Structures are given as structure tokens and as C-alpha cells.
Image (spheres, helix red, strand yellow):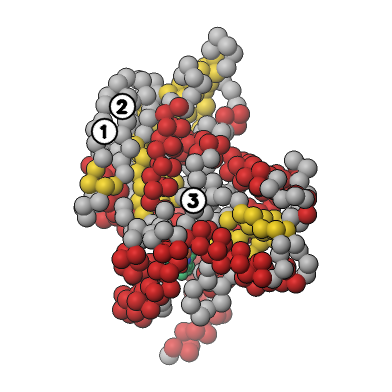
Amino acid sequence: MTMNAASYSSVVSHSAFRSLDTKLSPSSSGIPSLIRVTCHSDCNKSTSQASLLLCRSSNNGWKGMLGGTSSWDTLPRRNLIGQTSYSVSTTTYGGVAIESPSHIAEEKVGVLLLNLGGPETLNDVQPFLFNLFADPDIIRLPRLFQFLQRPLAKLISVLRAPKSKEGYAAIGGGSPLRKITDDQALALKDALDAKGLSSNVYIGMRYWYPFTEEAVHQIKRDGITRLVVLPLYPQFSISTTGSSIRVLQHMFREDASLSKLPVSIINSWYQRQGYIKSMADLIEKELQSFSEPKEAMIFFSAHGVPVSYVEDAGDPYRDQMEECIYLIMQELKARGINNEHTLAYQSRVGPVQWLKPYTDETLVELGQKGVRSLLAVPVSFVSEHIETLEEIDMEYRELALESGIKNWARVPALGLTPSFITDLADAVIEALPSAKALYASTSTSEEEHDPLRYLVKMFFGSILAFILFLSPRMITAFRNLI
Ligand SMILES: C=CC1=C(C)c2cc3[nH]c(cc4nc(cc5[nH]c(cc1n2)c(C)c5CCC(=O)O)C(CCC(=O)O)=C4C)c(C)c3C=C
Ligand SMILES: [Fe+2]
């Protein structure tokens, strides 16, 4: 029996497939028990065809064809710098089997969670800030001045450290990000197990331990054969997901075996139903803490980025943020919750223009306009961190109360919320089939093997070049040169 692939889009994401056949085998219950996704050309260039076989397990999860047992090492690892890096172990392998005409091989699935990282002690603050400001995706200097990146990072980190330290001291002397991300990794691994997919879950932090580089080394040592990269930022920004992916691209380009590893990168996931519904659940619940829930304004506060990122560099962050808020509000409206809402941007650093409106200015305005109840919703991050625990809960709360807002509450970050973790697991499963080598074979090598395609390209390329050469603009440009 062959069924429509679209009905299983929640299990199989087919964006990367050039062509796709999905065959579902019926079970006695009438629920299909086996999905075979046959992928031609794009996702596996070394063979002309590859099939991903997922079979429904007794608990309604999806299991691999082989389903045997092969245990991986279960010990926590030490990373290069002597810190424990996260490698969640697997005991049985019930994961994914890839079948090609010539071989059947077990996959070792890895999930790499990307996050920012945070200083664990006050002594870590300045070196953490140095790593952050040394990132060319955080301080974007013109190419000519890039030699100044590290000295500038040193200077800014030393100047900013005292203020940052105060913030970290106020939340207990360090960032909770590592512990929370560790817990999220474990929960995700469990959720994937429950869905029948055994995996190793790794954490790669951009600016503090365990660093992304170490996670990648571990992935290589563990012999992972298929990797899903899941940034813990719902929306994409050049400064967050973009920066971490740049590190990965660099490492994968430089390493022959990594360059062939099939990888699927989930760039953003703010539009996922599971995430939107989980956010709406948290908001709906927290609104009940007000004596008059309908009166409270829902105040989304997102981490800002400099305006130039969006307007000059094409960062989709603001668009994605606005769409995300729209989707959450639609979900709330569908539940009969019609509160007023607004979006503002927090945490600006340095003298440049950041995305507006600014959270602090907006709070003052709202107080002046007579808003009396306000529910703050942090929306660009999925764990508690300095900007929720210190900036929102302390600084902004105080400012709001001074500005005339009487009733204040804040929605917690998603953290380990089960519906959210389950949705992340679904996102991983959906991304798996589209994993492909980042650098293995390029269109050039494909063309080398396809002389007709090469000739057609050359023919039309020459015509285009000829037309361009004869265009009045080109002629004028040439005259000016002579
Ligand atoms: C989506 C989230 C984030 C974006 C976008 C982002 C951009 C961005 N951040 C800085 C500068 C700093 N960020 C700092 C901490 C920090 N940033 C995020 C998230 C985003 N940043 C988080 C979750 C955290 C907290 C981590 C923790 O330790 O808990 C800091 C350090 C703290 C401080 O001194 O305020 C700085 C500095 C820039 C310049 C930027 C975009 C260009
Ligand atoms: Fe930040």
C-alpha cells in the first residue's frame, strides 16, 4: 500500500529531498507500521538512492529496522580543558537503519545542542566576555580592521566585567545555563528514547564550557554517523545560531571525516506548534496569578541585536520574533484569551542603535499610559539566565513598579516543560532524514559526472557573458578604463 507522504510530514521532513517516495505498510491496527522514505540523489550523493526505514514500535514511537542491541560507552567524558563535557550515553540501539541497495548499516545518531554558555563563577566573567566580544559575529568589524578584534575584545571585556559581575553576583555568583542545558540534554535524550530513537546528545556552548569544538571532537570520537544540530534559540540570529554554525562549518570544512558526516541543521523552530502551544500554556497559567487576569498586558521581552544586523546584514531575527509573537497570540486567542500585548527588546550593549522599542523605555511609557498589570514573557531563550533572573526579575520589575505598574509577574523560561521537550524530540526526528554531508560532494563534482549538464551550463553561461559584455554599461565602463 502506498500512501501520501504529506500525511506523515510530522515524522519525515522532505525539504531536502529531490524526490521522495514514502511507503507505509499497514499493521493490524490499521495504523501504518513502517515508513520507507526513499531519497534520490540529494541526501546521499555516494549512492544513487538511499532509504530511511522507520518502523512503529509497540509504544507508538519509531524504531529502526534492525533494533538490535549494541551498547556505547556510558561514562561521562572529560573535555580537552579538563571539564566534564556532555555525552549522554545510549544503552541499546533501537534507532534508525539506513538501507541502500548495496548495504544495510546501523546509524549512530547524534544530537548537538548549541547554546551560548555562561560564566560559572565570578572569575569566569571577564574571560567569558572576552570570548563573546572576540566573536566577529558579535562585534562586526570591517575586514580591514579585523586585526583589532582580539585587542578590542580584551579592552571591552575588562571594562564591562565589573558591571557583568554585579549581575552574576546577584543571581548566585554564576550563570545557571550549563546546569539547565545539561538537564535539557538528558530530558531530550529520554524523549527520543521514548519515541524509539536512541541517540547521543551533546552540548556545544559558544563562549564557555563545554565548548562547541570539544563537543565536535567527542562526536567524532564516538563515531556518530548522522547528526542533527539543534540550536537552543527558537529564532535565528547571526549573533547566536549563525555564530555557532559558523564554528561548525569551519571545523567540518577542515576535517575530512567530518566533512562527509550527514548533518541536518535546524536553523530556527519558533514556528513549531509544540513550542507555540508550550509558550501559550505558560502564559495562560501565569495570567491566573493576577486578580484580574484579563486586565494584564502580555509584555514580550526579547534579547535585542544591533539594528545594523537586521537592516544591513539581513538578520531575520526581528521578522522571526514578530512572527513568533503573532503565532503565540493567535494560539492564545484560539483559547479565548484576548489580552493586550506588546513586544520590546532588552539587554543592549554599547553605543550603537539596537532594535526598538527598548524594554526599559517601553515599561516607563506603559506605566505613564496607565497600564497597571503586566506579565513579562522572555521569548528569545528557553532557559533561565542572567537576563531573566537579574535584568527582568530585578531591574525591569523595579523600573515597572516605579513607573506606576502595580501588579507584575513573569512567565518562567520553558526549561524542562515536557510538551516543549517532546516537541524538540519531534523536531530532531523530522530533521534526521534530510541530513547530508556539509562539504562532501559539491555540484562541481556532480557536473563532472554529468557532461550534458556541464555543456548546457557552459553554453548558456557563454551567451549570458556575451550579452553582458556588449551591454551599453559594460562598453561605457571599458571606455572609462582606457
Ligand atoms: C537570542 C538571544 C541572544 C541574542 C540575540 C544575543 C545577542 C547579543 N548579546 C550580546 C552581548 C551579551 N550577551 C550576554 C549574555 C547573554 N546573551 C544571551 C542571549 C542572546 N544574546 C544570553 C542568554 C545571555 C546570558 C548568558 C548567561 O550567562 O546567563 C552578555 C553577558 C552578560 C552581560 O554582561 O550583560 C553580553 C555582554 C551582544 C553584543 C549581542 C548581539 C550582537
Ligand atoms: Fe547576549
Q: Which mark is residue 383?
A: 3
* Of residues 330 and 130, the one drawn nearer to the viewer in this rendering: 130
Q: Which mark is residue 349?
A: none
Give the mark, 1 or 2, whose residue is nearer the N terminus.
Answer: 1
Position of the N terminus by quadrant: top right
Alpha carbon distance from label 2 to label 3: 28 Å
Residue 454: x percent and y percent?
Answer: 40, 51
Residue 119: x percent and y percent?
Answer: 36, 60
Assess whether mark 3 and mark 1 are in contact (beta carbons under 8 angstroms).
no
Quadrant in the picture for residue 308: bottom right
Task: Please state which amino acid type lies under the numbered disc 3.
Answer: Ser
Residue at 75% in and 42% down: 334
Mark 1 C-beta to ligand 1 under 8 Å: no
| Mark 1 element type | loop
Alpha carbon distance from label 1 to label 2: 8 Å
Task: Please state which amino acid type lies under the numbered disc 1.
Answer: Thr
Position of the C terminus by quadrant: bottom left
Give the mark, 2 or 3, whose residue is nearer the N terminus.
Answer: 2
Q: Could you tell me if residue 372 is visible in this image?
A: yes
Quadrant in the picture for residue 379: bottom right
For label 3, the crowd category at 10 Å Cα-Cα, with few meaning under 14, some 14 to 19 and many 20 or more, is many
Q: Is residue 253 left or right of residue 418?
A: left
Q: Would you name the residue on which mark 1 appears?
A: 74
Give the mark, 1 or 3, whose residue is nearer the N terminus.
Answer: 1
Q: Which mark is residue 91?
A: 2
Q: Is residue 351 left or right of residue 72?
A: right
Residue 294: x percent and y percent?
Answer: 78, 50
Mark 3 C-beta to ligand 1 under 8 Å: yes
